[in-house]
Image (spheres, rainbow, N blue to C red):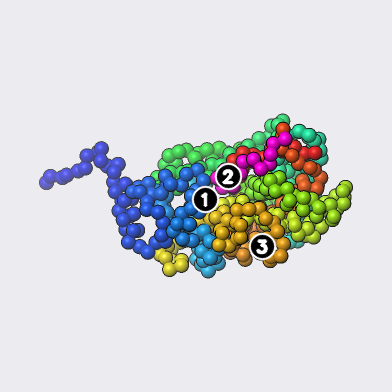
Amino acid sequence: MEYYTLPESLLFLIPFFFLILKQLIQKSQNLPPGTRPLPVLGNILQMGKNPHISLAQFAKMYGPLISVKLGTQLVVVASSPHSAAEILKTQDRLLSSRSPPSVAPYELSVIDQHSIVFSSDLSNHCKFLRAFCRTHLFSPKAVESQTALREKKVSEMIDFLRSRKGETVKISEILFGTILNTLGNLFFSKDLCDLNYETNTSGIKRVFRKFIELGAMPNISEFYPLFDALDLQGLRKQSQVYQNQLINIWSEIVKEKRQAISRGSSDFLDAMIDNGFSDLQINILLTELIGAGSDTTTATTEWAMTELLRNKSAMHKLQAELTSKFGENDIITESNISELPYLAACVKETLRLHSPTPFLIPRRAPETCKIMDYTIPKNSKLFVNAWAIGRDSNTWEDALSFKPERFLDSNVDFRGQDFGLIPFGAGRRICPGLGFARQEIHLILASLIHYFEWSLPNGEDPMQLDMEDKFGVTLQKEKPLRIVPM
């Protein structure tokens, strides 16, 4: 009997044949509208370096719910309050699933069991982790108990800035260090870095930034899950290197606490050990909490400072509110922060224009479903473009302008009920640290504005500040803000 076989040179085409066949099948489905994808590549080439902007432009052409193909991965994008509510509220129970990023340095089973951010569904263990973090870190009672610590770390930041009076500082580095030290004391009862970023040799800020940046890099494994196990770009390997460096930073602390004969439960690490957490559970949870808490809060505060420098009227109104409440020299405390409506409006307006996580944390459809009468195939990824929603002219008047006044006589808030303003997400997987972040941002921003006059180096015009985004897991400024405290 004679057998016919394909030439070896053509064998590599077989996977691409199935990719094209899959795309042809999906064309017959009632998918949300979108720009025509190329074979195999899909719409990858149309994303550019700022996909949140590209997808917002597609939404203007095709509607509030669109679909694009990134390689073989179908991505459905919501870009309006209504379409976001369909995913985060109406279908929240079904669509609470997530897909761990391919760059994650752990197996899927490990992530599902130990991650609070990327577990594929809201399993009982994930619910336990959220409840545990809420009890020990994020409940109103817990956040209030941390007040003295936040005030102390912000006071140290102010003292450091006073020592640099008249000098140009890279404010994001100082903010990042302040927040890292706040979290370090919550988790370990110790600082994690020196605020003097020019002489700091600990490296934790660099390692965290590198670790977070890897999560936002274009990844072949995300576009073509067929090749995930190969890690063709070596991103997962790099991620493991940085993860190990982070673990080394606190491994000795964990070891000492485990060996201590008598120790009070004074910080979050003590609470985890007392509740039987393994080293693996501790390492994953600490990495997620510190990474998420430090980067987003830093980015939001830096954007707030940038917008206030460019909008002198808003800056003067905030300074006047702070002076009327605290006088010229009184110390700012958290107990008075809730009595500053213009400060709250400035923070909301910053979060509206500069959502710290432009796509929130992407969700996944665990089964085929319907959204707004469109078919969403099983395993589609779901992006909520919070950046686009915050700039939606159908929702916000003069949407691209920084106008905190729009929130003064408004009940709109960012707690997940108003889908025009969802920087922390909504529904079952809303950011558990929202209350902590709110207190931290308000206290830091109020202190920076109250204690200093700020200018740009060499008398530069604030209106000429670069306002370009640097896309990533967190949306940062392309060019870090450099300013002079006086």
- The answer to which image quadrant residue 227 occupies is top left
Which of the numbered marks, if any, corresponds to residue 469?
2
Local crowd at mark 2 within 10 Å, few (<14), some, or many (≥20)?
Answer: some
Query: In x, y percent, where is residue 353?
Result: 62, 53
Of 401 and 468, nearer the camera is 401
10 Å crowding of disc 1: few (<14), some (14-19), many (20+): many
**Which numbered marker is on residue 413?**
3
3 and 1 marks in contact (CB < 8 Å): no
Q: Which amino acid, by three-letter code, is at mark 2?
A: Asp
* Residue at position x 55%, y 37% in the image: 241
Is residue 472 shown in magenta? yes
Q: Measured from the top left, where is residue 446 in percent x and y?
A: 77, 50
Q: Is residue 239 visible?
A: yes
The magenta segment is 459-475
- Gap in Å between the C-alphas at discs 2 and 3? 24 Å
Cα gap from disc 2 to disc 1, whole angstroms: 10 Å
Image side of residue 110 versus residue 481, left or right? left
Mark 2: secondary structure: strand
* Residue 248 shows in this picture: no
**Disc number for residue 171:** none
Residue 405 covered by magenta stretch:
no
- Check disc 1 and give the amino acid type: His
On the image, which quarter does residue 255 sit in? top right
> Marks 3/1: CA distance?
22 Å
Helix, strand or loop under label 1: helix
Nearest the eye: 283 or 392: 392
Asked whether, in this view, residue 236 is left or right of residue 147, the answer is left
Circle 1 residue: 52
Q: Are marks 2 and 3 in contact (CB under 8 Å)?
A: no
Residue contact at pointers 2 and 1, CB within 8 angstroms: yes
Q: Residue at x 48, y 53 (%)?
A: 57
